[in-house]
Amino acid sequence: KPRSLSGMQPTADSLHLGNYLGALQQWVQLQDSHDALYFIADLHAITVDYDPAQLRSRTRRTAAQFLAAGVDPDRSILFVQSQIAAHPRLSWVLECLTGMGEAARMTQFKDKSAKQERVSVGLLTYPMLMAADILIYDADRVPVGEDQRQHLEISRDLAERFNSRFGKSLVVPEPHIIKQTAKVYDLQEPTAKMSKSASSPLGILNLLDSPKALSKKIKSAVTDTGTEVRFDRDTKPGISNLLTIYSALSGKSIGTLEDEYAGKQYGHLKVDLAEVVVEYFAPIRERTEEYLADPAQLDAILGDGAKRASAIADATVARVYDSVGFLPRV
Ligand code: ATP
Ligand code: MG
């Protein structure tokens, strides 16, 4: 079976709809056809300011949401990145294959560093750690949102660079990016991506928001001038975003929705969409609460995943360290 791998940062108490539609939903689907590994990227989460107690709680919360959304520990390896010692061991080698200019050109680095008072070296080397996360498991496919495409490309470049320098050894991964839902936009700023750390509270639909909060956010979503419910990213970014979300959660095509709302107003669309979102999220929220009620069970699932992930990762690092000329420990 080909291998699917992906991760998310525990940078908020709740995942948002972009995380779900752009990535998590794909993770769950790929479990059937792929050997799957999914993880909580806590090493990545400390590249920006954070609070240790909050990180610990958010790591469990993120794991609980993965499980609640359908990641199945019997079919997938679910783990916490920091519990696998091999990731930073491979990352170091990849950092030494990356140019300073190459790293500094990454869009995410430029965006996030512009928002930080103190820019850490970790924020700059984030993509090399991400490449290590992927390459260490010989992953074939990486289900992510559009914003991670550039990091996937540098991961591919690094794999190829490593292979041509040291002899073929690393699998070159393919991004798995589903066009329709690869970028969900901020409800208040429908040309910027919905983001855990950058969106305003009103701009972001959280999986764990109360029904009341979800309805309120959808009803106050920024819409466009005009009255027609029609998909057009350029002139109607707000309505187009709502239609994309509606279509993804209801299974109805955008064309069908445009027909249904012909002659109706934005408000009608918002009222109905709020209902769709509330109903879709409710079972995920309930199951998340169930997992969180038993942290020992949660930690046991993660511990088991770490054991299985380590076995794969340690073997790759041994192979890589041998290729680059490090002396094996006897
Ligand atoms: P942060 O703001 O802390 O970077 P984030 O919302 O970008 O948080 P990540 O943990 O960085 O979330 O990303 C997890 C996954 O969700 C990645 O695969 C990413 O591509 C995807 N993703 C994030 N935001 C969106 C979005 N708005 N639309 C679609 N996919 C998204
Ligand atoms: Mg992000």
Image (cartoon, rainbow, N blue to C red):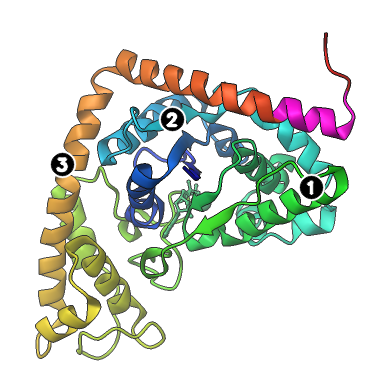
Residue drawn where x is 46% and y is 68% of the image = 192
Gap between marks 2 and 3, in whole Å? 23 Å
Mark 2 and mark 1: Cα distance apart in space: 27 Å
The disc label shown at residue 163, or none:
1
Query: Which secondary structure, mark 1?
Result: helix
Is residue 242 placed above or below 213 in the rendered structure? below
Question: In the visual, does 158 lie left or right of 30?
Answer: right
Indicate whether residue 81 is drawn in magenta. Answer: no
Residue 5: % across, % down? 50, 42
Within the image, what quadrant is residue 297 found in? top left
The residue identified by callout 3 is 283
Residue positioned 79% across, 58% down in the render: 102
Q: Point out which mark residue 77 bears.
A: 2
| Three-letter amino acid code at the position of disc 2 | Ile
Residues rendered magenta in the picture: 317-326
Query: Badge 1 local density, few (<14 within 10 Å), some, or many (20+)?
Result: some
User: Which is in the foreground here, disc 2 or disc 3?
Assistant: 2
